Image: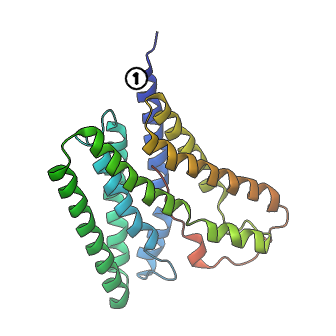
């Protein structure tokens, strides 16, 4: 019979594939920026924030911080590299005011990650305590990221239009949340279950709104560029 570890590995691989799809989803936006040689009305905030999120989850997935989370390590390492590339593209095609802001935020993130890594590895001597400390930090960042679509959902309710909330992205976020919740339940990990459980609820809410307001949507209305750029949410 197939054991729990094997099932969990398969689920984790599926989660890696879905998460990779979410990481690569901003590619059309970045291609548009490169083609226009300008960031237009797009904002770097989602990518800059996801750099920190991926960095912390990469650290969490390391075997001396948490056990049996290699697949969390792999996808977030890939995501970290991709988000750094996205941020660099924004940096290249931004004006100096925006570049200074990106530099400041990234510098703060690097300092924060360095402090967390140093303190955890130097002062915390057991894997279980490291898991708890880093896991709590990761939950805080993930919850903050899952709150970001609230502005779009509020706009959907107010305008009775889902034009500003891409269906496929909401569906992918739902699948991503469910997969990682299952992964964490197979070998109990509350630090993965909690943020992805909240992410699943957020995605379900978006899908319900989509069903409710689909018929009242004016698809001919022009979409502001800043609203077509979506943040990436994952474990």
| Residue 114 locus on image (x, y percent) | 21, 62
**Occupied quadrant, residue 16:** top left
Q: Which residue is mark 1?
A: 5
9 to the left or right of 150: left
Observer able to see residue 219: no
Residue lying at 43% horizontally and 37% vertically, measured from the top left: 189
Residue lying at 47% horizontally and 28% vertically, measured from the top left: 186
| Residue 183 locus on image (x, y percent) | 47, 34
Residue lying at 52% horizontally and 39% vertically, measured from the top left: 181
Quick check: 125 above or below 91?
above
Residue nearest the observer in this picture, 152 or 227: 152
Furthest-top residue in this view:
1
Quick check: 183 above or below 19?
above
Quick check: 35 above or below 167?
below
3 to the left or right of 173: left
**Occupied quadrant, residue 96:** bottom left
Furthest-right residue in this view:
215
| Residue 28 locus on image (x, y percent) | 50, 65
> What is the number of callouts on the image?
1
Residue nearest the observer in this picture, 135 or 55: 135
Circle 1 — which element? helix
Residue lying at 40% horizontally and 81% vertically, measured from the top left: 37
| Residue 130 locus on image (x, y percent) | 27, 45
16 to the left or right of 59: right
85 to the left or right of 189: left
Observer able to see residue 131: yes
Q: What coloring was used for the rendering?
A: rainbow
**Occupied quadrant, residue 107:** bottom left
Label 1 CA crowd tier, 10 Å (few <14, some 14–19, many 20+): few
């Amino acid at each position: 019979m197939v054991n729990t570890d094997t099932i969990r590995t398969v689920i984790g691989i599926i989660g890696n594939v879905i998460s990779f799809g979410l990481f690569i989803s901003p590619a059309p936006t970045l291609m548009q920026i490169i083609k226009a040689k300008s960031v237009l009305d797009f904002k770097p905030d989602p990518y800059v924030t996801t750099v920190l999120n991926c960095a912390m989850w990469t650290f969490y997935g390391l075997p001396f911080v948490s056990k049996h989370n290699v697949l969390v390590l792999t996808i977030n390492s890939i995501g970290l590299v991709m988000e750094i590339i996205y941020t660099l593209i924004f940096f290249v095609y931004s004006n100096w005011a925006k570049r200074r802001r990106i530099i400041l935020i990234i510098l703060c993130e690097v300092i924060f990650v360095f402090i967390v890594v140093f303190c955890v590895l130097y002062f915390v001597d057991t894997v279980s305590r490291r898991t708890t400390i880093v896991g709590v930090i990761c939950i805080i960042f993930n919850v903050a990221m899952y709150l970001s679509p609230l502005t779009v959902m509020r706009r959907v309710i107010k305008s009775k239009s889902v034009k500003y909330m891409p269906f496929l992205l909401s569906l992918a976020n739902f699948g991503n949340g469910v997969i990682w919740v299952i992964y964490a339940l197979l070998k109990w990990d509350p630090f993965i279950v909690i943020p992805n459980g909240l992410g699943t609820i957020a995605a379900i809410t978006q899908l319900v709104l989509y069903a409710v307001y689909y018929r009242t949507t004016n698809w001919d209305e022009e979409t502001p560029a800043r609203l077509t750029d979506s943040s990436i949410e994952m474990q």
